């Protein structure tokens, strides 16, 4: 049982003095120190984006710890706050307002859903806050009027053309498309159809399916009835698990081309290697086996016991990019100064760097830098959208084996 | 800080308007509408499409309210034959049908890509930093007018009639009341509130897409009603404030309670709402401010 002693007036006076002194000390010290750079991580922890948000947050935290362990960026420590947007626009907007107004963040990272991104853009723009996202909606670059939005994800058009190129190189003749009904996957499906038909081919079928079903047999059967030799499957992990299981049970023989954030170790573990044998998994990669990704992958595995996915590596790159931009802008820079430096530290010309430490040293030596990250070489186009390269991995005996790399720049030239 | 509080206020008032409409349908008439979000979506899309085409926002909002009201009429016809759980299923199906239509009719709604560049309320009339405050005041005024009208309505002969239908429809019919007409009117009034709320929300967010109008929104409004009490206006107001208060207030748990990771915190927030709901249903089934007589 807890006993409370009656507080005397003297005790009260002494306690108050101690508390006041305790509170004043950090303030006095803070006046001398540099202001931290505050980052808000707006993650989809629940809702459709729930499988990806926790990975992104963990990767961003690894990056923040790395930068702070090196003394911060331009002497400024990074402080990260995180909120769940529930993959909903109104909840996302409230979380954004909270982080901007209460936590005073200067940048919001890890925005996953296109709908949330478009809903919060007017607020981040109005507050002059940097916003970094992994969204595929073509409207986001168009709405990026103030240049504060940075997109780490290839646009639908670029992704779809990469799929078409992969299918063509492997000699497929009758591709079918199945896509989860949201802006990103529907956009990819339509862009794939356009890209394939421009090359003189014809789709066997295109089916957009509603998510959150216990079975997709009807949609799958309608696709298989058209006898495709490959299915381009735009899915997230929960629906892909059901779809692939039902396809395997059907006994129909065809290949799959899928995004890497779905066809990964988690899916192999969930379905078993037999089901996924020969599936082609496509995701952003640096040009070669990249030190930034290898470093993140090992750190991520050490901390979580899991494999870092594409979104996680994008979240990691967002923090490193911000840290390098803060370093380049200097200790007293404003948010807009930092924003102006983002392109400068990530896009050629400049000395290639693959970590914050490398970039910081080069910047302090007065050199220009070009950060190549864990998710891609992080080169931004005019409207703030990255054009990454694509790694084509084949699942062989339960392992993802890199078969080839398709250059994003070569695809974007055709659009 | 001010902007965040204003945003919370706006969210509460939008949900309150929806909850007021649902209270009229369920709390006072006994109609289980599980498709409220369908009317919200109709209002949001009607007002947004018209405003994007250049129609002034006030006219767009009136049209949105009108169309949502009209769309409730066929549901009212169905409601004549259905009651309780059956009506709930039909209305749920209606809201899903609305969402599917919004997804597939790309020529009008841009499908899953959603509508962007929706004109913002008061944009060009006041300086950008004051827009949110003006929207809050407008919503406050609309809610005050709506709730005063509801209060007058439920105390009028119409109100007594719908309450009689809720408590015992057969008896009301035996007394010569045209219950079908009263139920339809109640549904249409509730739908009007939902449509207006949807329109206002669209002009606040400036972006809408079909994935925003999922049944979860309807269930949030239901949670507000269950928490506060569906058959009193005070209950509706308090229930909405508690719901949004819980959802937003729980964001700060991590600041005060250590040892909870962000991943767990996201689940804890939803868990808290669930627990509050269970406690209310167990210990105060009529809601915190509902009438104490438990109806059969």
Image (cartoon, rainbow, N blue to C red):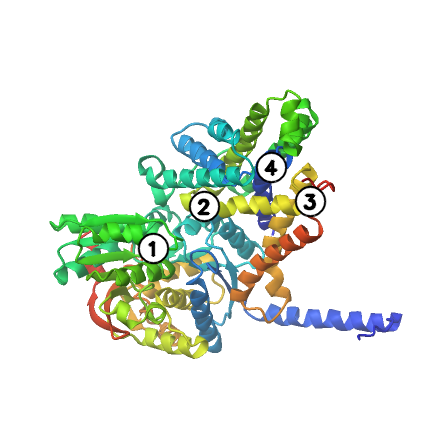
Q: CA distance from mark 1 to mark 4?
A: 49 Å
Location of mark 4 (residue): B26
The answer to whether the residues at label 1 and label 2 have Cβ atoms under 8 Å apart is no
Q: Is residue A245 visible?
A: yes
Quadrant where the image shows the C terminus of chain B: top right
Whether marks 2 and 3 lie on the same chain: yes
Judged from the image, the secondary structure of the residue bearing numbered disc 2 is helix
Q: Chain letter of disc 4?
A: B
Location of mark 3 (residue): B286
Quarter of the image for residue B154 reads top right
- Compare residues B96 and A95 and report the one nearer the observer: B96
Q: CA distance from mark 4 to mark 2?
A: 23 Å
Q: Is residue A286 visible?
A: no
Tag count? 4
Quarter of the image for residue A169 reads bottom left
Residue B212 - label: 2
Residue A384 - label: 1
Left or right of A176? Residue B292 is: right
The answer to whether the residues at label 3 and label 4 have Cβ atoms under 8 Å apart is no
Whether marks 3 and 1 lie on the same chain: no
């Amino acid at each position: 049982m807890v006993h409370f002693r009656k507080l005397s007036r003297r005790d009260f006076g002494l306690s108050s003095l101690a508390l006041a002194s305790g509170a004043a000390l950090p303030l006095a010290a803070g006046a001398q120190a540099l202001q931290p750079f505050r980052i808000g991580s707006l993650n989809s922890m629940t809702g459709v984006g729930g499988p990806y948000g926790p990975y992104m947050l963990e990767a961003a935290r690894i990056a923040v710890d790395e930068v702070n362990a090196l003394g911060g960026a331009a002497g400024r420590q990074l402080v990260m706050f995180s909120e769940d947007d529930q993959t909903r626009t109104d909840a996302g907007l409230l979380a954004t307002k909270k982080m901007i107004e209460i936590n005073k963040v200067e940048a919001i990272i890890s925005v996953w859903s296109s709908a949330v991104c478009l809903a919060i853009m007017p607020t981040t723009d109005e507050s002059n806050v940097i916003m970094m996202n992994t969204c595929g909606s073509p409207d986001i670059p168009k709405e990026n009027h103030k240049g504060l939005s940075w997109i780490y994800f290839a646009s639908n058009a670029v992704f779809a053309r990469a799929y078409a190129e992969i299918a063509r190189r492997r000699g497929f003749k009758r591709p079918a498309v199945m896509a989860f009904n949201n802006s990103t996957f529907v956009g990819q499906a339509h862009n794939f159809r356009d890209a394939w038909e421009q090359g003189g081919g014809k789709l066997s079928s295109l089916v957009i399916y509603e998510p959150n079903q216990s079975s997709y047999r009807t949609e799958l059967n309608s696709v298989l009835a058209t006898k495709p030799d490959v299915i381009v499957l735009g899915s997230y992990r929960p629906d892909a698990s059901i779809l692939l299981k039902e396809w395997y049970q059907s006994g129909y023989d065809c290949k799959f081309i899928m995004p890497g954030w779905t066809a990964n170790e988690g899916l192999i573990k969930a379905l078993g290697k037999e089901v996924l044998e020969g599936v082609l998994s496509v995701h952003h990669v640096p040009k070669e086996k990249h030190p930034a990704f290898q470093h993140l992958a090992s750190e991520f595995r050490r901390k979580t016991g899991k494999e870092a996915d594409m979104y996680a590596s994008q979240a990691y790159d967002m923090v490193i990019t911000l840290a390098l931009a803060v370093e380049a802008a200097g200790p007293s820079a404003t948010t807009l100064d930092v924003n102006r430096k983002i392109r400068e530290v990530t896009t050629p010309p400049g000395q290639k760097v693959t970590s914050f430490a490398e970039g910081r040293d080069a910047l302090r030596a007065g050199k220009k830098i070009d950060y190549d990250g864990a998710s891609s070489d992080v080169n931004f186009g005019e409207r703030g959208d990255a054009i990454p390269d694509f790694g084509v991995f084949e699942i062989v005996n339960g392992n993802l084996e890199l078969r080839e790399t398709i250059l994003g720049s070569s695809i974007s030239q055709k659009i | 800080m001010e902007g965040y509080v204003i945003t919370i206020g706006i969210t509460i008032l939008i949900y309150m308007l929806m909850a007021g409409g649902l209270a009229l349908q369920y709390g006072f008439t006994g109609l289980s509408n599980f498709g409220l979000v369908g009317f919200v979506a109709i209002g949001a899309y009607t007002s947004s499409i018209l405003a994007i085409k250049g129609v002034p926002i006030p006219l767009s909002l009136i049209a949105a309210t009108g169309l949502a009201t009209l769309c409730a009429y066929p549901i009212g016809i169905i409601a004549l034959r259905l009651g309780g759980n059956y009506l709930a299923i039909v209305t749920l199906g209606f809201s899903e049908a609305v969402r599917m239509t919004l997804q597939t009719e790309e020529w009008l709604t841009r499908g899953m890509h959603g509508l962007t560049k929706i004109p913002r309320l008061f944009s060009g009339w006041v300086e950008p930093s004051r827009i949110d405050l003006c929207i809050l005041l407008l919503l406050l005024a609309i809610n005050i007018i709506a709730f005063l009208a509801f209060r007058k309505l439920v105390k009028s002969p119409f109100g007594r009639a719908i309450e009689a239908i809720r408590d015992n429809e057969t008896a009301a019919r035996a007394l010569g009341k045209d219950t079908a007409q009263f139920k339809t009117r109640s549904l249409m009034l509730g739908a009007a509130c939902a449509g207006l709320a949807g329109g206002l929300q669209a002009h606040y967010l400036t972006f809408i897409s079909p994935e925003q109008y999922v049944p979860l929104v309807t269930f949030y409004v239901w949670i507000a009603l269950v928490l506060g009490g569906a058959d009193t206006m005070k209950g509706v107001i308090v229930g909405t404030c508690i719901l949004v208060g819980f959802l937003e207030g729980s964001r700060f748990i991590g600041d005060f309670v250590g040892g909870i990771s962000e991943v767990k915190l996201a689940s804890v927030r939803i868990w808290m709402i669930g627990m509050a709901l269970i406690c209310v249903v167990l210990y105060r089934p009529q809601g915190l401010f509902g009438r104490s007589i438990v109806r059969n």
